[in-house]
Amino acid sequence: MHFNPYGGAAAELAVRLVNSAPDHNLQQLLAESDYKPLGSLDAAQEAELRRWVCELDAVFTDPTVERLNALLAKTASQPYISTHDDRLPHLHFSRLEAPVDERVKAYTAMGLATLFCEDPDRIGRCARDGCTEVFVDISRNGRRRFCSTRCSTRVHVAQHRSRRAS
């Protein structure tokens, strides 16, 4: 399934933030995700983003209108149309000169909200017991239940072995 850039790339950044290790370098994660904010994260901004990750995580557990509206209300969103880097006109959701953490918060909240409005069942948490990973379902049929093929295979092999043992 193809999502608009904010329902796709922004939601995927939310996934990467939630699935990252607590000690992962967030500036590096943003760069690896092709998110190019002006400036870098200072210690206070990094702490704020780590707190934000907990709020994003809750959306993957229980994606609701109320939860997403609460996230949106906590951002300093000021939408405008941008044409930077010779790209076609597209929306940005915070001022260009805003601190990095504010920009990431607005971007990820809008991405998840956009995705939710397009298809709320595409926001998910892995169904394998013990796995805490989250995902955005971009499959054609929209029936993804696991974060990866590895988790899916583990569950299905365990179910097969259980049936054979019976």
Image (cartoon, rainbow, N blue to C red):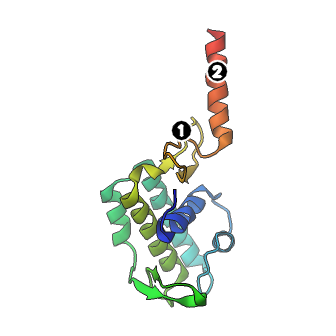
Observer-side mark, 2 or 1, equals 2
Tag 2: amino acid: His
> Which residue occupies 65% across, 57% down?
21
Which picture quadrant has residue 31?
Answer: bottom right
Q: Residue at x 62, y 80 (%)?
A: 36
Question: For the point 48% across and 66% down, which residue is it?
Answer: 52
Query: Where does the C terminus fall, quadrant-wise?
Result: top right
Residue 108 in view of the camera: no
Q: What is the number of callouts on the image?
A: 2
Q: Nearer the viewer, residue 4 or 151?
A: 4
Residue 149 in the image: state x and y as whole percent: 66, 42
Circles 2, 1 touching at the beta carbon (< 8 Å): no
Q: Is residue 26 left or right of residue 62?
A: right
Q: Tell which of 82 and 14 is nearer to you.
A: 82
| Picture residue at 53% right of the left edge, 49% below the top | 140
Percent across and percent down for residue 158 are 65, 25
Q: Secondary structure at mark 2?
A: helix
What residue is pinned by disc 2? 160
Q: CA distance from mark 2 to mark 1?
A: 17 Å
Q: Nearer the viewer, residue 28 or 148?
A: 148
Residue matched to label 1:
127
Tell me: residue 148, above or below residue 72. above
Q: Is residue 21 left or right of residue 49?
A: right
